[in-house]
Amino acid sequence: VDVEVTLHELVPAEDLSPRGRRAVLKTTLTRGRGAETPADGAHVQVRIETGGGVGVGARLADAGARNLTLEFDLGDGTGGDGLRIALMSMLRSEVARVRIAHRLLGPPLLDEIAENATDAHEAMRVELLAFEQARAAEYLSAAELIERVGKIKGTANAQWAAGDAAAACAAYTRGLRLLGMVDVASGAEAAEERTLRVALSLNGAACALHGS
């Protein structure tokens, strides 16, 4: 059988990973609209297709394609740091093939990886359906600031557990800085603020010991 193949276009993969270690690779399939990309803390709506021949690499538990539609705040830990990094480079309605190292994946994506996966990366098709930027911290109420810091702490704890001490320590510091902006709080909010402050301070002390 004779087959004629014509290469019309070669789209290189963009290395988005810190220090260029190829942990997060993105190839744009359909360019999005506008020029704005979501910043950390933005509320995003994402459609993700995994498995089913999306790309070579680890196979998911489901032999066919899986479609996930997620809605979350960037930085709250959903999907892991790899997905967060990829989404922060995307435009509205952009579709991309993304390849992420397993160590940078988080639930629910990490839950989909088969136990017998042999590759250290997972390929997926990601579509950024919509996003809304987070309001600047100075415009948030005490309750909103406390809620945001709680999410930062949860993400940092997951990073620490995964062995990414540098990212976790930076997040603990950021959380403490945001808590410093809480100047008016009710009794319940004040108690929650104190609990968060103590936890972040203790974790910060652990960071200092880790770095010494």
Image (spheres, grey):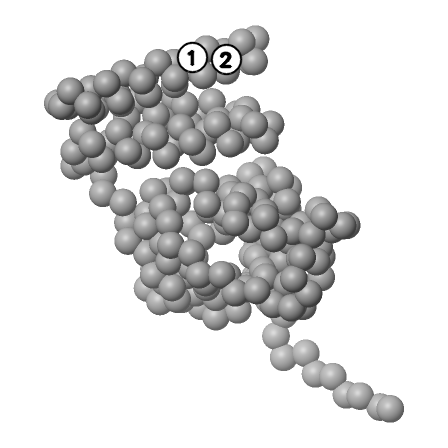
Compare residues 28 and 114 and report the one nearer the observer.
Answer: 114
Where does residue 83 sit, x and y in percent of width and height? 50, 49
Where does residue 175 sit, x and y in percent of width and height? 34, 25
Compared with 177, 75 (above or below) is below
Compared with 32, 81 (above or below) is above
Q: Please, which residue is most extreme toward the front here?
A: 188
Q: Residue at x 67, y 57 (%)?
A: 61
Compare residues 88 and 199 and report the one nearer the observer.
Answer: 199
Where does residue 78 sit, x and y in percent of width and height? 46, 45
User: Dividing the image into 4 quarters, which one contains the C terminus?
Assistant: top right
Q: Residue at x 40, y 28 (%)?
A: 153
Q: Residue at x 36, y 26 (%)?
A: 174
Amino acid at dot 1: Leu
Q: CA distance from mark 2 to mark 1?
A: 6 Å
Q: Is residue 123 left or right of residue 136?
A: right
Q: Residue at x 48, y 70 (%)?
A: 30
Please give the residue where the numbered disc 2 appears in the rendered image.
Answer: 206
Q: Which mark is residue 120?
A: none
Which corner quadrant of the image does residue 136 belong to?
top left
Q: Is residue 96 left or right of residue 57?
A: left
Where does residue 158 sit, x and y in percent of width and height? 51, 32
Q: Are marks 2 and 1 in contact (CB under 8 Å)?
A: yes
Which corner quadrant of the image does residue 69 belong to?
bottom left
Q: Is residue 128 left or right of residue 142?
A: right
User: Dividing the image into 4 quarters, which one contains the N terminus?
Assistant: bottom right
Sort mark 1 into few (<14), some (14-19) or many (20+) by Cα contacts within 10 Å. Answer: few
Please give the residue where the numbered disc 1 appears in the rendered image.
Answer: 202
